Amino acid sequence: MNKIITMENIKKNFGDKTVLNDISYSIYESEIFGLLGPSGAGKTTIINILTGQLTKSGGEAYVFGVNTDNLTDDIYLSIGMVLERIGIFERLSCYQNLAVFAGIHDVSKHEILKALEMVNLADDVNTKAYKLSKGMRQRLAIARAILHKPKLLFLDEPTSGLDPSNSLEIHKLIFSLREQGVTIFLTTHKMDEAMKLCDNIALLCNGVIMEYGEPTEIC
């Protein structure tokens, strides 16, 4: 099976502070990988390194076999992201929000309705974003991230603050994407969520991976 992500002895310093120390693991095609840890553990920093938003202080990281210091446009077209700040345009409808990104990614607007249907927002095509519930907004953000059909999807605490019903909708969507061959990198601080969703997890604390493996083994 193909490796989608590889991290080898990754270190990240901000001045004198070490945020990540000797991080190593691999993620394979169609895997749901969970990165667990408390706030400030370094989860978002890892995502930022893997997506080329931060340079590493040491070690090597690869996405689709390309060093993260040299990610190309082709690689970015294979990546989708839903980060903590989802960046929804409040005054635009669900359709209009996705239309903006369809233009950026040169995606046919016919794909917009397909993406909205996939996240169960087909009945809210013309609903303004500011009228959406938190769970619906999160699903809209995921629709935007998968609009260009990425092969790798980063989800940064996608169910944070959601009620059990909305969390279940996100979980169903994650499984559906995995069935389509999408590799998913998930951060969460919920062990029960990781147990349900993930093939492998890493427990991150103070910039160090304390445990790595299948959720049942770690528990």
Image: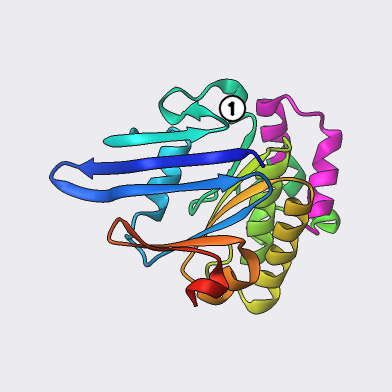
Count of numbered circles on the image = 1
Residue lying at 35% horizontally and 54% vertically, measured from the top left: 42
Residue lying at 61% horizontally and 46% vertically, measured from the top left: 28
**Hey, which quadrant is residue 103 in on the image?**
top right
Quarter the N terminus occupies? top right
For residue 16, side relative to residue 155 (left or right):
left
Residue lying at 22% horizontally and 43% vertically, measured from the top left: 13
| Circle 1 SS class | helix
Q: Position of residue 88 (x, y in %)?
A: 59, 48
Q: Position of residue 71 (x, y in %)?
A: 50, 25
**Which residue is farthest left?**
16
Q: Position of residue 90 (x, y in %)?
A: 61, 50
> Up-down: is 195 above or below 184?
below
For residue 29, side relative to residue 72 (left or right):
right
Please say whether residue 94 is visible from this viewpoint: yes
- Let me know if residue 6 is in the magenta part: no
- Let me know if residue 104 is in the magenta part: yes
Residue 117 versus residue 62: which sits nearer the camera? 62
Q: Which residues are magenta?
A: 98-120
Residue lying at 27% horizontally and 42% vertically, measured from the top left: 12
For residue 82, side relative to residue 182 (left or right):
left
Question: Which colour scheme appears in the figure?
Answer: rainbow
Q: Mark 1: few, some, or many residues within 10 Å (few <14, many ≥20)? A: some
Secondary structure predominantly adopted by residues drawn in magenta: helix
**Hey, which quadrant is residue 95 in on the image?**
top right
Q: What residue is pinned by disc 1?
A: 75
Which amino acid lies under the numbered mark 1 shown in the image of this protein? Ile
> Up-down: is 99 above or below 160?
above
Residue 8 versus residue 207: which sits nearer the camera? 8
Please say whether residue 87 is visible from this viewpoint: no
